């Protein structure tokens, strides 16, 4: 799709080529250059959906609600500009992210640490290249669960490959459009709450109900962009709905854009790896979840938001998260007798080992920190983070200035806490085989992740009072 097909809802600048040399309008004190754009990424033909093993192998041919990728650019000049991209998908893998970041850095000179891609984690999105390892095993897991050793249907494979390649092009184009549309704007943020998420492990377990919201307006006060974050899985609609949809995240965007005509709404997910909507299975629940967040955002906008006067400064690093153990050939052979996903993974892994490949001993994990002039610390973190990370990081860095985007840049697997790894269960154990990993992660990973975050954040946040949220 060419750039002319992108629906740009904000025309912050219509100048010709992308330029960092000077702004067409002199920036006023207290303002920040910002630009936003959107593009439709809904599949135009049949495609397999991801997210549920219990969903059949049939391709989806209907779109219940459209999917979008949206980009928000902050700042002016390549060294002072940051790009946030949100995408209505269950996840984003590093293969796609790296292609997008490399192209954008080459075209614009942007620092890769200043580019982030956050997936909404809707379970109504197309398969993007076996991100979750369920293409050839379907059924009512674990009751009527079947493996399939045959290759995926060629037509289905081609549809997935085509969607994935087009996605990369669209993400680059929407990012460039947001950069082109920058104009002096007023940027502010605040935190509210939403209540529909529940912990899906222990009844009454912890949930992060915080609702951080970022607002961008023009100099006359008209809302141009809204960025919302909430920690909850996108599984309001189950596997029986084999139609493309954005789940509650898509509904939030729709309702906010209806409340604020001309604005673009963007949604990311926090540490919601072990949280899901308390009410599921009906369209009316999806509508209600979206309405709760949209109404709470509207109320928050009526309060005094915290102004952000400068673009975020980004830092990024990769850390190595060790697995608890790496199975031997003999152990893999034994594992193939398992009738669950663990056995399915063992069959795939055994074939790779026999071909001479090595199973990974650790997981490469990306952590990105954006500092908005010490007024807001935004963490962009890979994988499906569980709530314990929100609890600990907010306690150690200060809940009042912290925003955590999970499912960012590389959704490789669940990232359980020490507590969950000790308890076991889906997020700690079985999920790893769905994600094509050889074993659960080691109990040391929580400390590795938190230590890496603390290494990247400014001292002003490390010294925050350790108040609980």
Image (spheres, rainbow, N blue to C red):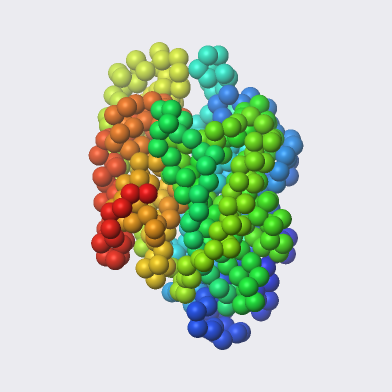
Percent of width and height locating residue 202: 40, 28
Position above or below: 339 against 291: above
Residue lying furthest bottom: 26
- x and y, in percent, of residue 284 in the image: 69, 36
Vertical arrangement, residue 419 with respect to residue 306, above or below: above
Query: For residue 173, what is the image quadrant?
Result: bottom right
Q: Quadrant of the N terminus?
A: bottom right
Q: Position of residue 276 (x, y in %)?
A: 51, 35
Total count of labels: 0
Query: Of residues 259 and 101, which is closer to you in this image?
Result: 259
Q: Can you give x and y, in whole percent of width and height, for residue 346 in the image? A: 40, 23
| Left or right side of 258 for 311 | left
- Residue occupying the point 34% across, 32% down: 420
Does the rendering let one see residue 330?
yes
Q: Nearer the viewer, residue 271 or 438?
A: 271
Is residue 145 positioned above or below 387 on the image? above
| 182 w.r.t. 48: above or below | below
Res. 413 in view: no
Q: What residue is rendered at 52% in x and 42% in y?
A: 195
Q: Quadrant of residue 207?
A: top left
Residue drawn at point x = 63 percent, y = 33 percent: 237
- Residue at coordinates 37% horizontally, 30% vertically from top-left? 428
Residue in front for this viewpoint, 32 or 45: 32
């Amino acid at each position: 799709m060419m750039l002319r097909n992108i629906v740009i809802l904000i025309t912050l600048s219509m100048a010709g080529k992308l330029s960092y040399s000077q702004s067409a309008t002199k920036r006023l004190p207290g303002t920040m250059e910002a630009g936003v754009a959107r593009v439709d990424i809904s599949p135009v033909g049949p495609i397999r959906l991801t997210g549920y093993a219990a969903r059949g192998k049939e391709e989806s041919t209907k779109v219940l609600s459209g999917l979008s990728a949206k980009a928000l650019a902050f700042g002016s000049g390549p060294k002072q500009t940051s790009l946030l991209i949100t995408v209505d998908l269950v996840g984003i893998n590093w293969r796609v992210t790296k292609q997008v970041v490399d192209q954008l850095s080459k075209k614009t000179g942007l620092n890769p640490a200043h580019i982030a891609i956050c997936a909404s984690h809707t379970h109504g999105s197309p398969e993007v290249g076996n991100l979750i390892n369920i293409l050839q095993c379907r059924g009512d897991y674990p009751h009527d669960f079947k493996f399939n050793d045959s290759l995926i249907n060629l037509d289905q494979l081609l549809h997935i490959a085509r969607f994935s390649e087009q996605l990369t092009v669209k993400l680059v184009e929407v990012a460039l459009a947001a950069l082109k549309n920058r104009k002096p704007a007023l940027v502010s943020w605040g935190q509210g709450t939403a209540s529909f998420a529940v912990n899906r492990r222990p009844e009454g377990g912890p949930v992060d109900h915080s609702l951080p919201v970022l607002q961008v307006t023009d100099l006359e006060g008209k809302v141009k962009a809204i960025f919302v974050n909430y920690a909850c899985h996108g599984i309001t609609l189950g596997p029986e709905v084999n139609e493309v949809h954005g789940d509650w995240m898509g509904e939030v965007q729709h309702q906010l854009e209806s409340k604020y005509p001309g604005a673009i709404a963007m949604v990311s997910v926090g540490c919601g790896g072990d949280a899901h909507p308390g009410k599921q299975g009906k369209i009316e629940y999806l509508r209600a979840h979206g309405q709760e967040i949209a109404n709470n955002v509207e109320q928050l906008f009526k309060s005094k938001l915290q102004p952000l006067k400068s673009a975020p400064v980004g830092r990024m690093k990769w850390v190595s998260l060790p697995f608890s153990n790496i199975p031997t050939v003999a152990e893999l052979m034994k594992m193939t007798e398992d009738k669950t996903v663990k056995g399915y993974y063992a069959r795939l892994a055994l074939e790779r080992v026999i071909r001479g490949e090595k199973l990974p001993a650790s997981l490469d994990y990306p952590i990105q920190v954006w500092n908005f002039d010490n007024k807001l610390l935004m963490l962009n973190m890979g994988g499906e983070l569980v709530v314990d990370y929100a609890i600990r990081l907010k306690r150690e860095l200060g809940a009042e200035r912290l925003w955590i985007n999970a499912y960012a840049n590389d959704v490789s697997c669940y990232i359980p806490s020490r507590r969950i790894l000790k308890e076991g269960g889906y997020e700690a154990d079985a999920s790893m085989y769905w994600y094509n990993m050889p074993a659960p992660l080691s109990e040391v990973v929580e400390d590795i992740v938190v230590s890496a975050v603390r290494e990247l954040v400014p001292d002003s946040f490390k010294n925050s009072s350790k108040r609980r949220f």
